[in-house]
Amino acid sequence: MDAARAPLGLGLWLCAAYYVASLLAVLALGLFATADDFAYDITLVRLLAQSAIASVGLWLLWRRAAAFPRFGVISGACVLALLAIDIWIGEGVGGESELLIGSTALVGAAVFAVETLAVMLYLALSSRVRVVCTRVLGCGSVDTDPGSEGFYFERPLSWHWWRNLGIYYAASTLIGHWGEICFCWLIVLGVFQGSYDFSHDQLWSWWLYPYPAEGIAAVLCVVILYPFKQWLLKRFGGRLAPTLIVSFLVTMAVCAAIDFSAGILFNADYELWDYRELPFNFMGQIVLQNTLVYSVIATFVVWVLYPWVAGLLQKANQTAVDVVFFSLAGAYTFLEVLYFLTITPAGLVIG
């Protein structure tokens, strides 16, 4: 029987259930806890690693990859090591959250450790695993779309295209956060006008707090601004000066629209920022100096950074890029739940 069509069997289905339960347990902790319940310590590292490992494990099992048994054993050992370190030097299982402390947490940790050991032993010793998980995943680069004329480095709407968009989005939400910190320091140093608040937890204390606006901006750079720049180059016969000018003006309009939309949705009461005292502001939500800074960054992304990164991803080992995507997806989902969703006695709180 073809290994790709062979039934998984009870053991591998239990492995899949283990990874699903591991991922759901981390997400549940993020759902019932708040960001203030966590410090940036070994507990948070363990939870991020656990969610990333569970996501990659499920993907490898779904693909019936030959590397799955080895991954399961090695990643299981890493999870157990992180769990032991967390209990030994950290706050214990569950970190600072009052939801998981005391004997209940220790019992849960013991059960999780036993399950992890059982999965590791099964993957290491079972002959069934070696029969079912035989697929060698591709290691080559991805072909460009021959009809794209340079508009994309991947075929639009293909798996590689969607996967890379996910990487750009998730990474940009975090990089954008750190970029906002740098921008605030420039305000502190007097380079730009504006106000800053060092007590603002979302910016200064929660270092992994995702900024979705920056992620959306990165996606728009890829799906709209980069193709538009390529189209302009063709219309202007390859002349850089007029292409750059028009591209920059359109980029300014897009950046202003994103910034204003984020302000209307999340800053209606001016709690996060307030530009009403600055010149060239609109409704206190956007201001010309910021729009210019964002536009310069976006132009750099469209003209330099995106072509370089997309080229690297195109030439890279595609299985490795897939692993990066699923790892990032698992960890990022936990961060989204932790920071934006909380279950309270009054119900679900969003934001």
Image: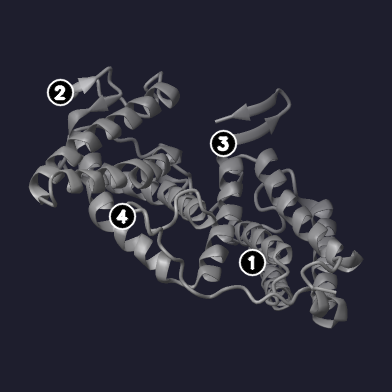
Q: Earlier in the sequence, mark 3 or mark 2?
A: 2
The answer to which image quadrant residue 154 occupies is: bottom left
**Element type where label 1 sits in the image:** helix
Res 340 label: 3
The residue carrying pointer 3 sits among few (fewer than 14), some (14 to 19) or many (20 or more) residues within 10 Å by Cα, namely some
Disc 1: which residue: 89
Of residues 226 and 199, the one nearer the viewer is: 226
Report which quarter residue 73 is drawn in.
Answer: bottom right
The answer, for residue 154, to whether it is visible in the render is yes
Name, please, the residue furthest toward the front: 147
- Looking at the rendered structure, the kind of residue marked 4 is Glu
Tell me the distance, in whole angstroms, between the alpha carbons under discs 4 and 3: 40 Å
Three-letter residue code for mark 3: Phe
Name the residue tied to disc 2: 279
Asked if the residues shown at circle 1 and circle 2 are in contact, with their CB atoms under 8 angstroms apart, the answer is no
Q: Nearer the viewer, mark 4 or mark 1?
A: 4
User: CA gap, disc 4 to disc 1?
Assistant: 55 Å
What amino acid is at disc 1?
Answer: Ile
Query: Secondary structure beneath disc 2?
Result: loop
Query: Spatial distance from mark 3 to mark 2, Cα to Cα?
Result: 33 Å
**Image check: 221 left or right of 99?**
left
Which image quadrant for residue 220? top left
Q: CA distance from mark 1 to mark 2?
A: 51 Å
Secondary structure at numbered mark 3 = helix
Callout 2–callout 4 Cβ contact below 8 Å: no
The first of marks 1 and 2 along the sequence is: 1
Residue behind mark 4: 149
* 256, 346: nearer the viewer: 256
